[in-house]
Amino acid sequence: MDKKYCAYICSGCGIGDSLDIDALSGVVTEEMTMECKVHKCLCSAEGRALIQQDIDDGVNTVVVGACSPRVMTNEFNFGEDKITVRANLREQVIWSEMKPAEGEEPSPDAAAFLNESAADYMRMACVRAQKTELPDPYQLEVLTRNVLVMGGGIAGLTSAKEAAAAGYDVVLIEREDELGGKALGWRQSFPSRSPWTALETNPVNGLIAEVEADPRITVKTGTEVARISGAPGNFGVTLKATGTTCEWDAPAKVTVEEQDLINKGEKKDPNDGLRPYTQLNPEALKIGAVVLATGWKPADVSQFEHLGYGKIKSVVTNAEFEKLAKEGKVPAKVAFVQSPGGKENSKDFPYSNSVLSMVALKQAHYVIDDNEDGQAFILYQHMRTPGSMELFYKDAQNNDGVFLTKGAVTLVEEKGRGASVTVEDTLFGETLNIDVDMVVLAAGMEPMTLHENSINLAYRQGPTFNDLDLFDGYADSHFICFPYETRRTGVYTCGGVRKAETMEETIDDATGAALKAIQCIESADRGVAVHPRSGDQTYPEFFMQRCTQCKRCTEECPFGALDDDERGTPLPNPTRCRRCGICMGACPERIIGFRDYNIDMIGSMVKAIEVPEDDADRLRIVAFVCENDAYPAIDMSGMRRNGISHMVRVVPVRCLGSVNMAWIRDALSSGLDGVLLLGCAYGDDYQCHFVKGSEIANRRMENTAETLTTLGLESGRCKTEQVAITDYDRIPGIINGFVDEIVEMGPNPFKGF
Amino acid sequence: MTDEQGTSGAVLVVGGGISGLTATLEAAEVGKDVFLVEKNPSLGGRVSQMYQYFPKLCPPSCGLEINYRRIRDNRGVRVYTMTTVKSVSGTPGNYEVVLETAPRYVNSNCTACGACSEACPDEVDNEFNFGMDKRKAAYIPHEMAFPRRYVIDKEALSAEGAEAIQAACKYDAIDLDMPAETRTIRVGSIVWATGWNPYDASKIENLKFDQSDAIITNMMMERLASPNGPTKGKIVRPGDNKEIESVAFVQCAGSRDENNLRYCSYVCCMATFKQITYIREQYPAAKIYVYYIDLRTPGKYEQFSDKLMDDKNSFFIKGKVADVIPEEDGGVTVIAEDALNAKKISQKVDMVVLATGMQAVQALAPLPVALHTDSDGFIISENEKGMIAAGCAKKASDVVTCTQNSTAAALKAIQISGR
């Protein structure tokens, strides 16, 4: 685009009272050679009309020096074919001015400090405007709109049905020879409606019939996924008969080091006989997005020896008991054991969630319903019946045949054809021995992702999800606000692979997963990113001629968006990409960039910061801050009038992981005195919405700090801090504390070189 | 959005809390036009009052910020705050909805400079902080408020106040004669994400909520712990600002109780464990007593509760609280029976936190539309009619469950609207 620029400075909201606006607009016109206009309230109808008039006269790139880009977004949006860059003069300059401490005189330079800061923000905004380009969305050559649903249980059936009802074709695959999954073995289901007391007809057969009759759904039973290659909107899925192996099975992950050993013949290639992961199967089924609903399997409970499972015939799991109940009558006297811990702990069986409390209540019903003199003993540590299921629980408490006892089950022994159960620490402090016909153990629901790769991706980073261990094998999101976000774009999980869920929860979960799959396809079609940068039309572009095949980008991408060829040259998959820029931060050759966010742009912005010489009161520190958390926190800090040192210039970044160490070198070599990175918490409870960004940035900074020392610079001149969006009262202390450290070190010795 | 009046392909979402935001954005990012109406002056709902989410202990405003950015960037979403649904007519796939927007008394000229608030002499109890401090009659609810536009509480505004704020506003943004506005839109389906209210603690007679400042609710604790709360995040006893040496949590305050809420509110056990971390962070040695019936921390939440139950200064007592007695020194004595040994316990503490539950909003204030609800006021979805419940309007649940079923609601809405 042939750019025609104009800059505008707003003097409203106190900006004109605090800043020398003439001088500021002089910086723009003279230094940045950009026309600059001033208005007393730029966001007003009149102010916007001023800009619009210029746009009508040909201006297409607008710099607005006013409030934070987080406000007045609509007001300063002049259409998709125009560029607007904002300089945050209000929240982060005039509202963030350091006030003198009580009893202290204000610095005689205070006004000058503020003007210098504003001038740097205008310089940076002008450079950004010069370096930014309109996005040109990535379009797949061919887009496939259908959804693959893996797993034909309640979750998979629901996802298939709901996606089809929204107008999308679905391929539903099921490993077994018939649809229905675990639910086929259930006699009845929990109450799902008021008054929450009556068991309901198992809906699975109805659901199967609906799915089988749906012309949009293709059902393939006895089928498994060998591999999924490609990317959202254009996955290639190779199917195979259950239990077989084939040359298209997904290759295991081979690290760079392992590959070296394999090449040297020192290690056996685990993928011998398999097609390389980058090879496309011409026979593969074309798929737009995937729902993983492969469910769960009952946990092995024989490890709890005192409960006798596997040794005593009358000790069964809840799944086995359900089968028995479905086939016929259950015994008259049954004990349900909810916690295996004996006296050691009161935990539930692993992988129980709250579902197994309700399963016990349901199965107690069978005992009562099948036997006139039925007695069900529920031996629990915690009855977990959330929401209205409390009423189901209450109903059981009022049932003369159901005995609910809180206590520790310490022993199950064979007795006649049944068993004797010892319960200690009951509410009445006694030890009970209960003789029953059968003992039912509340065996947990282990996600299939604990046991197998499940999605079988043919990706550089391996066939399965990352971080499964953080969730005991569940393929869950780590985000409370965004429960469907996995680290594999276009693959959404639901049902038992995600957590132990009731039927009602499963149906909602599966419907939500279907929505996400559809949304991903539509986003790929529009050439825009999915969560969290939903709608972003830019994507990383690679200047491959300069790639040195270092593989950092392919290794570090948290979403596995990059594959590579045999030489190690990255093979981007833009529809897998979340646009965080971590690859850009990783690249030592600086060959990765976005149209509106790249190495040259940010580097040039940093270099645009004016660096006064020989002035200890005017050191310059650049802070690269996460635009989602640290940046809003600094805005709010300004709203609360917390002061931030006049020596600091804030540069928002997509993710701390996108910070390329070249910017830090640029900053220090152009005479800036320190570099601060503010990003999100990392570790098991990471808050980074790109999962690994802040952690990776921290690691890179440690290496950079080492490099600084070899150059004779103090390693403390660059620093990373973890902050949260609520740290608006803490961040000023962090920033100003860092400034104090830099002041202590004195000016950057490279200044002026 | 192509059409301000809506189309049969559009979706209406009622309620701008985390569930409504989720339903809105998930539908809009498929490419649908969505109207989002919220009765309060800003979006975010209940979660915007919370300090952290369990079990990650991360701030809700982080996810809200992402959602607000998604709204700003999505031209398919139209947000109306201070707006309620007046009536719905028509048929599934083709509803006509009348919306009423209460006057904000601040027009679109507002730059959010804050001069009106600064100049305003009138103060009232701050509902955002459950009355634990004051706010001005010209205000923004909090720093994260979206949209960031001031609002005038006209009832709290004196004649002098009116003059002062009008004089302070340089942008002609204050319009004290602003009328209520109605508009009619056309949509195919409606997602009801009307949310929840904390159960009114004063209804639980034995817990004496109204009789002592030392007795607070769990939502008040969220505000006390929040950096933008009434005490800037310092947890102290309201009234006398005493630092906390001991605190008692009363679980199931009004929940699982035939005289109050019959059901289990699902979140209160985990909320208490989370709030134990708030207290521990500020008071490493404070004694913490938790009175409970069952600890409902299932699944992965059990790992979170286990860690906290190891704390040697935290005591977990299975037993229902019978009485709470305000003491002269500002503290309170909790009377309970320990169900494990049938002993009566009397425990003096500095502060009591009532773990009150969730009540569906429409349990107290009926909606203008005849929706199908259960006996506790939760909305039962009628998908075929395009009347879909989401979040805590559907059932008491944690945030993950809300965002999950709100995503599901978005699909159900699209199925009707997309016909």
Image (cartoon, rainbow, N blue to C red):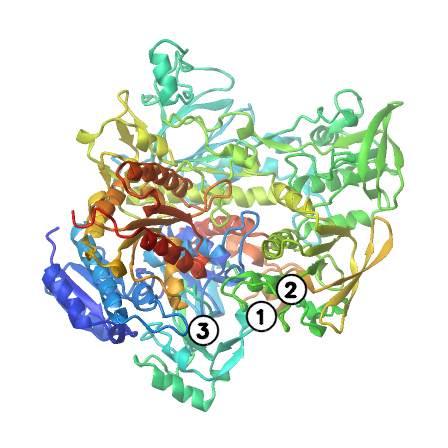
Badge nearest the viewer, 3 or 1: 1
Q: Secondary structure at mark 2?
A: strand
Q: Which mark is residue B138?
A: none
Q: Quadrant of residue A261?
A: top left
* Residue B330 image offset from top left, x and y in percent: 71, 71
Give the chain letter at badge 3.
B
Q: Please state if A591 lies on the left or on the right of A277 as rendered.
A: left
**Residues beneath discs 3 and 1 located on the same chain:** yes
Alpha carbon distance from label 3 to label 2: 32 Å
Q: Nearer the viewer, residue A247 or B120?
A: B120
Alpha carbon distance from label 2 to label 1: 10 Å
Comes first in the chain, label 3 or label 1: 3
Q: Residues within 10 Å of mark 2 (few under 14, many from 20)?
A: many
**Can you see residue A210?**
no
Q: Quadrant of residue A546?
A: top left
* Residue A564 image offset from top left, x and y in percent: 30, 26
- Outermost bottom residue: B159
Q: Quadrant of residue A86?
A: bottom left
Return the residue at label 3.
B100
Comes first in the chain, label 3 or label 2: 3
Return the residue at label 2.
B217
Return the residue at label 1.
B130
Give the chain letter at badge 2.
B
Comes first in the chain, label 2 or label 1: 1
Name the residue located 54 percent from the left edge and 35 percent from the top edge: A474
The disc labelled 1 sits on which kind of residue? Answer: Phe
Alpha carbon distance from label 3 to label 1: 26 Å
